[in-house]
Image (cartoon, rainbow, N blue to C red):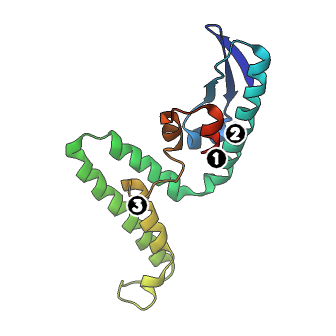
Amino acid sequence: MYLERRRRRWYALHDIPKSAQAALGSRRFVQSLETEDRKIAERRAAVFAVKWRGAIEQARTNNGDHIERDARSWHKALQDAPEQEREVIRSLIADEAQGMVDGAASRAGYVEVTEPGYDELPVHQDAERFFDIATGKLVRFDAHLEEYLATLGNERKTVDMK
């Protein structure tokens, strides 16, 4: 992490390692420290350093959760698509979820969906989670936290407490 002065204000910057860039969706963290004093900026930057290192570590360890990563990719495609194409994308998402179930059932030796035990396969929960994340029905708790905190008209300490 390093500090950079831009237009008389200090900014904290932290380059994200290539292994975590895809998960975090960026090459670098940048945050204004809202001060012109370097010593104050250094103290404020320490907080962001801890937060960003934690985010990088989490991104590295969560790379194994391909379901959420794939679902977020589909969700972004769904959001970016024009209204007339969204139904087609929803259909593709449903097909992808069904493909997950079919593949796992095939590997487990199931031929027919009517066979006993087919409905109890754990992949059904994964496919449902994938579908819900991809269509926006399931959202991470902290997905909109920063936006909410930005709307609060309180002092920084009060916002941190909330």
| Rendered image quadrant of residue 10 | top right
Answer yes or no: do the residues labelled 3 and 2 have beta carbons within 8 Å?
no
Amino acid bearing label 1: Ala
Q: Nearer the viewer, mark 3 or mark 2?
A: 2
| Rendered image quadrant of residue 99 | bottom left
Amino acid bearing label 3: Asp
Answer yes or no: do the residues labelled 2 and 1 have beta carbons within 8 Å?
no
Q: What residue lies at 51% left-to-right and 32% top-to-bottom?
A: 153
Q: What residue lies at 67% left-to-right and 47% top-to-bottom?
A: 60
Q: Position of residue 138 (x, y in %)?
A: 43, 58
> Which of the two labelled residues, at mark 3 and mark 2, occupies the earlier sequence position?
2
Q: Position of residue 100 (x, y in %)?
A: 44, 67
Q: Residue 59, labelled with which disc?
A: 1
Mark 2, other Cα within 10 Å: few <14 / some 14–19 / many ≥20: few
Residue with the most extreme left position: 84
The correct choice, above or below, for 41 with respect to 22 in the image is above
Secondary structure under tag 1 reads helix
Q: Position of residue 9 (x, y in %)?
A: 65, 13
The correct choice, above or below, for 9 with respect to 158 in the image is above
- Which residue carries the number 3 mark? 132
**Left or right, 140 with reference to 115:** right
Mark pair 3, 2: CA separation: 28 Å
Residue nearest the viewer, comparing 138 with 23: 138
Mark pair 3, 1: CA separation: 21 Å
Secondary structure under tag 3 reads helix
- Which residue carries the number 2 mark? 51
Secondary structure under tag 2 reads helix
Mark 3, other Cα within 10 Å: few <14 / some 14–19 / many ≥20: some
Amino acid bearing label 2: Lys
> Which of the two labelled residues, at mark 3 and mark 1, occupies the earlier sequence position?
1
